[in-house]
Image (tube, grey):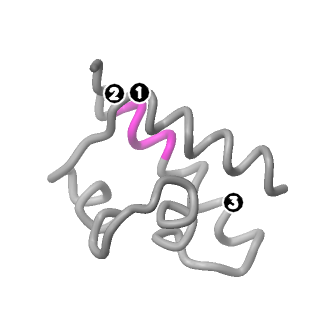
Amino acid sequence: MPKIMQSSLDKLLAEVESYAAAKGVQPSTVLRKSFNAGHGVYASLRAGKSDLHTNTVDQIRQFMRDNK
């Protein structure tokens, strides 16, 4: 499965952070609810220590669209 590049990951994390702020939750909560992310996934992504598959990115964006 293809993974996303860092610039795309940075863009996604900015989207997640904006969505989280609008909903009054932490970005890690958005990831947990969108694809059952475990503890520390957001911090690992933010630090550049992890990446995501494109289908997971699609899941996250779909979750945010469906839960505006």
Q: Please identify the quadrant where the C terminus is shown.
A: bottom right
In the rendering, at what x and y percent does residue 17 appear? 57, 62
Q: Secondary structure at mark 1?
A: helix
Magenta-colored stretch includes residue 68: no
Q: Which residue is mark 2?
A: 4
Residue 15 coordinates in the image, percent (x, y): 60, 49
Residue visible at 71% across and 80% down?
24
Q: Which residue is mark 3?
A: 19
Residue lying at the far top of the rendered structure? 2
* Of the image marks 1 and 3, the number of the one nearer the N terminus: 3
Q: Secondary structure at mark 3?
A: helix
What residue would you read off at disc 1?
Answer: 54
Residue at 53% from the left image edge and 73% from the top image edge: 29
* Magenta extent: 7-12
Furthest residue in direction right, as rendered:
68
| 29 vs 12, nearest the viewer | 29
Instruction: Give the distance between the C-alpha atoms of the residues marked 2 and 1, in whole angstroms.
Output: 6 Å
**Mark with earlier residue (3, 2):** 2
User: Real-space Cα distance between discs 1 and 3?
Assistant: 19 Å
Question: Residue 7's quadrant in the figure?
Answer: top left
Q: Residue furthest left?
A: 49
Residue 32, position as x, y percentages in the image: 48, 66
In the displayed structure, 46 sits above or below 63; it is: below
Disc 2 and disc 1 in contact, CB within 8 angstroms: yes
Does residue 9 sit above or below 8 in this rendering?
below
Instruction: Give the amino acid at mark 1.
Output: Thr
